[in-house]
Image (cartoon, grey):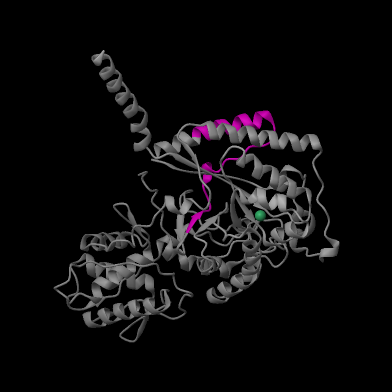
Amino acid sequence: MRWFWSRVVALSLILFAFLTGPVAAALPVYVTFWFDTEDFILPEADDAAMRLAEMFAARNVQATFKIVGEKARVLEERGRDDVIAALAKNDIAYHSTYHSVHPTPSEYCRDLTWQEGVSEFTRREGAGLRTLRKVFGVNASCYGQPGGSWTPQSYAALRAFDIPLYLDETSHVNVDNRPFWYCGVLNILRLGDAVIRTGWTDQEVRQACEKFDRVHKKLLDEGGGIISIYYHPCEFVHTQFWDGVNFARGANPPRSQWKRPPMKSPQEQKQAFDAFEAFLDHIIRHAQTRLVTAREIPSLYPDRVYSRPLTRRDVQMIAEAFRKELSYVDLDGKIASAGEGLLALAQTVAKADDDSGTGEVTLEFVYGPASAPQRFVTEGTYSSAAIQEASQELLDIVQQTGQMPSVIWVAGEPVRPEDFAVTLANVVASGGLSGNVALRRGELAARKYVADDSPGLWGWVVFPEGFRAPHMMEVAKLQAWTIKPPVLRKLD
Ligand SMILES: [Zn+2]
C-alpha cells in the first residue's frame, strides 16, 4: 500500500502546485466599493446607509463609506447608534463638512493662492473631519470632493490630516484612466472603463455583470488593476438628489427652508437594493477578485522611489528622458515624478566635484511651485560654478520648504524650473559640467494630465451658473511636477 499513498501524496502536491501556482503568480483584480454618504436632510437615507453597510457585513466583506461631517453629526443627533454601528463595520472615509452648502471647496478656493487655499480647506473641511473622528473613533481612510468641487489645495491639507488616498471620480486630473500620484497623495480619481455601476432593472444588472467580466479580463491582461464602484445610499430611496432640490445653481436657502427630496415607492426601493445585491454577489463570486477598502489601497501601491537611493544609471535615465519630455520617468519599476527627477539632477550637478561619491542620490517628496514667475530669462550662458550654485540653492530651498521654488536664480537671473530642469538634463546627459552652460527651454509635459479650465469641468448642478476657475486650474497645473503612476505591488 506504500506505493498507493506515495502516489496520493505526489498527486496532491501536483494538484496543490496547480491550484496555488498561477494564482500566486498573477495579480488579482482589486475591486473597491464606495458610498458617498452625504444626504443629511432625508432621514430615510440613514436607513439606506445602514442596509447597505449590513449587506456587506453579512458577506464578511467591507465597503468604504465616505461620510459628510454634517451627516455624522445628524446621525448622532437623531440617535441613530444603529446606523453608526453598521457603518463602523465597514471602512470610514471623509466627504467634506457640508458637501453642497455654499461655498463648496472649488468655490472658496477659486481665487486663492496655493497657501491660502491649503489654509482655508484645512479650516473649513477640518471641522467636519473632527466630527467624523469623534463619532466613529477613527481617522478617515480617504477623501473625495463633493460633486465636482475639486481643488488642488485640498491635497496638502489631506497630507496634514494624515489621509493618504483621494478616492472619487472626476476629470480634473487624469493619467490614462488609471491610478496616479498627485501632490504626494495616491489618487483613484478617473478610471475610465474600470468604473462600473448597475442600474436597477434586471437587464441593467446583466449588462453591468457582463461589463465587469470584460473589464476584469482586460485588467488581468494588464497585469492586475483596480475597479471602482460607487453609489450614494440616498439614491436607493430618493428620486432626486437632496442637494439638487436645495442647493442647485448656487441656491443657498437657510436650514429652516431645506426641503426633503421626493422618494421612491417601497417597491422601487426594493428593486434598487435587490439589483445592487445581485451585482455585488456576482463580483464576490468572481474568481481572481479581491475586495479592498480605501484603507487597504495605499498598501497595494508602495512608492519605492524613496526607499533606496537612485543609482548613477537611474539619474542618467532621468536626464535622457527629460531631454525628450519633462514628465515622470519609469526607472525599472520605481517611478520618479518630474519634480523628483529635477531634484535628482540637481543633487548630481551640485556634487559634481566630489569624485569620491558613488553617484547615488536620495529622493523625498516635493510639492510643485506655488506660483509661476511673471519675469524670467529665456536665454543665457552661465559658468559651471553658477549652475552648480543654483542647483545647491534649489536643494536648500526644497529642504526648508518641501516645495519647489517658482524661480531658480542663476548668476542673479530668474530661470523657470522647467528651463532649469532641461538645462541640467542636458548637462548630465552629455557627461557632466564642463565650461559654460547654455540655458535650454523646457515645458512641463506632465501639465497635460491636469484639465484645462472649461465649462464642462464645472458641470455639477450645485455650482452657480457659469462657474469657472481658470486661476485655480493654473495652480493645479503647477502641481503636475508631482504626477506619476503608482506601481501595483506584487503579491508576497
Ligand atoms: Zn457627494
Q: Quadrant of residue 373?
A: bottom left
Residue reaching furthest to the bottom = 412
Residue 42: x %, y % from top left: 79, 52
Residue 149: x %, y % from top left: 63, 61
| Count of labels in the image | 0
- Whether residue 111 is visible here, answered yes or no, is no
Left or right: where 102 falls relative to 295? right
Q: Quadrant of residue 349?
A: bottom left
Quarter of the image for the C terminus: give it.
top left
Left or right: where 470 falls relative to 382? right
Left or right: where 30 falls relative to 253? left
Quarter of the image for the N terminus: give it.
top left
Q: Nearer the viewer, residue 72 or 282?
A: 72
Q: Nearer the viewer, residue 168 or 74?
A: 74
Left or right: where 344 falls relative to 457? left
The answer to whether residue 212 is magenta is yes
Residue 396: x %, y % from top left: 34, 80
Residue at image point 59% right, 71% down: 122
- Whether residue 405 is visible here, answered yes or no, is yes
Residue reaching furthest to the right = 257
Residue reaching furthest to the front = 1
The answer to whether residue 63 is magenta is no
Residue at image point 72% right, 66% down: 102
Where does the magenta region start and end? 186-214
